[in-house]
Amino acid sequence: MTKEKFQNLNFKDKINYLNTKLREGKTVTKIRQNIGIGEKTLQREIKANGYKYDNKLKQYVPNIQANTISNTSDNKIVVLDKNTSPILKESQKIAINFLEQNLEVFEMLVEKFKANTTSNTNSNTDKKQIIIDLIDDKHLNPKAKAFRVNMFVYKKWQEFCEKQRYSKQDLLSMAMKEYMEKYK
């Protein structure tokens, strides 16, 4: 190929031409000499367009190290850049769609898991944070029940509940649950 023809090619065609010649066993130096293009000129153009020479592959490849994903099961490398998107299997697309639709639920589950698995303490006090771990029964229309409670305990309970971010129903239910678990 002549120098003029090579220079008139778009960049992708230049890379394809170079990689084809490299697969045929020619070296970069020989290819450049045959075209009649200087080493620095070629290197500058390749680098400016986000490519580099990979010694292992003996090919010009996109220079996007941060976005390279290696798939170890079949040793394929997927390179993502601004102009391309990854090729996904249908099952992967369905899974991603499901995750997107249920993101809020997953976030709540993760927060609940973190709260249950760590011994969080309030930064202002040495008291442990309250963890509400109840089965959601809102759809069962929870029933109101009346209890007789010691007046002093009830006043303290009222003060306590005002300082919490949970409802009295959830706090009372959780307190009863913990008490039952403790004294089985």
Image (cartoon, helix red, strand yellow):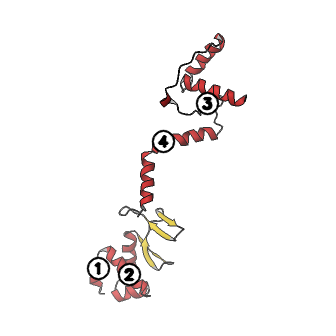
Dot 1 alpha-carbon crowd within 10 angstroms: few under 14, some 14 to 19, many 20 or more? few
Q: Which residue is mark 2?
A: 18
Locate residue 46 relative to residue 153 in the image: left or right: left
Q: Callout 2: helix, strand or loop? A: helix
Q: Which residue is mark 1?
A: 7
Q: Which mark is residue 130?
A: 3
Mark nearer the viewer, 4 or 3 = 4
Q: Residue at x 57, y 22 (%)?
A: 163
Q: Specify the amino acid type for callout 2.
A: Leu
Mark nearer the viewer, 3 or 1 = 3
Q: Are marks 1 and 4 in contact (CB under 8 Å)?
A: no
| Mark found first going from the N terminus, 1 or 2 | 1
| Mark found first going from the N terminus, 1 or 4 | 1
Residue 147, percent from left and from top: 61, 15
Q: CA distance from mark 1 to mark 2?
A: 13 Å
Residue closest to the far top: 151
Q: Which residue is mark 4?
A: 105
Residue 119, percent from left and from top: 66, 37
Q: Specify the amino acid type for callout 4.
A: Val
- The front one of 168 and 147 is 147
Which quarter of the figure is the C terminus placed in?
Answer: top right
Q: CA distance from mark 1 to mark 4?
A: 55 Å
Q: Residue at x 41, y 51 (%)?
A: 97
Q: CA distance from mark 4 to mark 3?
A: 21 Å
Q: Specify the amino acid type for callout 1.
A: Gln
Residue 23 falls in which quadrant of the image? bottom left
